[in-house]
Image (cartoon, rainbow, N blue to C red):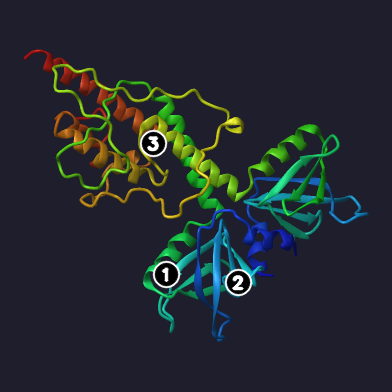
Amino acid sequence: MKLNERSLAFYATCDAPVDNAGFLYKKGGRHAAYHRRWFVLRGNMLFYFEDAASREPVGVIILEGCTVELVEAAEEFAFAVRFAGTRARTYVLAAESQAAMEGWVKALSRASFDYLRLVVRELEQQLAAVRGAGGPALPLPLPLPLPLPQPLPQPLPQPLSPTPAPPLPRWPTALPPKENGCAVWSTEATFRPGSEPPPPPPRRRASAPHGSLDLAPFARLHECYGQEIRALRGQWLSSRVQP
Amino acid sequence: MRYNEKELQALSRQPAEMAAELGMRGPKKGSVLKRRLVKLVVNFLFYFRTDEAEPVGALLLERCKVTREEPGTFSISFVEDPERKYHFECSSEEQCQEWMEALRRASYEFMRRSLIFYRNEIRKVTGKVCTGLQVARVRLWVAEEVFWPLTAICPPYRTLWSSLAYPRRPGSS
């Protein structure tokens, strides 16, 4: 099969964001030795070079339809990139430390185009949902003296003033929807690998008995709980009016 | 450069975002227009002889430029050699437009920018960072990070917190 290898080599060494880079040992074949190579993960392409200063990659592993697993191997910190199919090759790689191995396994598991597309679609739906449900006068989260289970990812807005019936800060009003084609991209130039979702809260482990709500799209969940919030808040405010 | 050809062939058999029979002309001077089955799968454009199961070739669609040529015709070229163009002839203007738009969105780098864009937009509206993974994790995070702190100053939020953390159908007591 022909492939635009020149472009591929160019993509390997251009200034596009790199998702991970480092030395790994790559097993040559079934009974072959390990070779130390400089690996660069960019998108769904895992390039490997003779060394970090090489201008052209020795080769590339295209990471679609693969799974990344830990393996039992003579080498320490070994893991495998396994493809489906009867005669498909499994690439056994070994890192130089536990941390490096974990970093690579995580980066490679999320490297496929398919996965990224899934995440983008999910975010697209969530944005539509929060814009659609946007506008209600919800109080913003407050900085509290309580010890929080996890550090909050964003700095919190100002606390409420202590006067009775204070005007509560509103959510930012929903932005008018923009056509995707002419939307302004973020000025963030680089993709920060390792920016991950906040880890699940530690105390919560039991799964829900009612399966249907688990599978509800975020939009519907947001709407349902939003209604409850408004109702509860209304009740609470009216109960506070009488001293 | 070595590459895992078998996996690339397997990828060419995956469901395509777009597939059509188009006229294709290679980048070399004097190339002849040939009928090819052109198939877009993730960030690869595969092209097959119309009666064959294995692709003749594949183009990785990163750092590429999609340009309108004559009416109904577009070309793909790559940033490092803009004069080297692969030409594609469509059967209608609409088809040409459709393909050009699909190809422009077909790169990993485009997807990455979309992710950053949506994340920022969501943050602007909600004030929260959300990376769009499993709905259950998001719901739990909202329960713990947004509602739990509020329960101290507004006891009714406890109901919300517990209904998110221990979900039951809303409206039931």
Q: Residue B52 carries which label?
A: none
Residue shown at 25% from the left, 27% from the top: B171
Circle 2 chain: A
Which residue occupies the foreground of this view, A6 or A121?
A6
Q: Would you say B51 lies left or right of B134 here?
A: right
Residue found farthest to the right: B30
Instruction: Specify the amino acid type for callout 1.
Output: Met
Judging by the rendered image, the residue that carries numbered circle 3 is A218
**The quarter of the displayed image where residue A31 is located:** bottom right
Which residue occupies the foreground of this view, A58 or A204?
A58
**Label 2 to label 1: alpha-carbon separation:** 18 Å
Q: Which mark is residue A101?
A: 1
Which of pointers 2 and 3 lies earlier in the amino acid sequence? 2
Q: Residue A49 carries which label?
A: 2
Q: State whether residue B154 is above or below residue A72.
A: above
* Disc 1: CA contacts within 10 A as few (<14), some (14-19) or many (>=20): many
Residue B124 screen position, x and y as percent: 41, 32
Which of pointers 3 and 1 lies earlier in the amino acid sequence? 1
Badge 3 and badge 1 both on one subunit? yes
Residue A71 screen position, x and y as percent: 43, 75
Residue shown at 90% from the left, 54% from the top: B31
Quadrant of the rendering where the C terminus of chain A is positioned: top left
Which residue occupies the foreground of this view, B132 or A54?
A54
Instruction: Specify the amino acid type for callout 3.
Output: Phe
Q: Would you say B46 lies left or right of B43 here?
A: right
Circle 3 chain: A
Instruction: Specify the amino acid type for callout 2.
Output: Phe
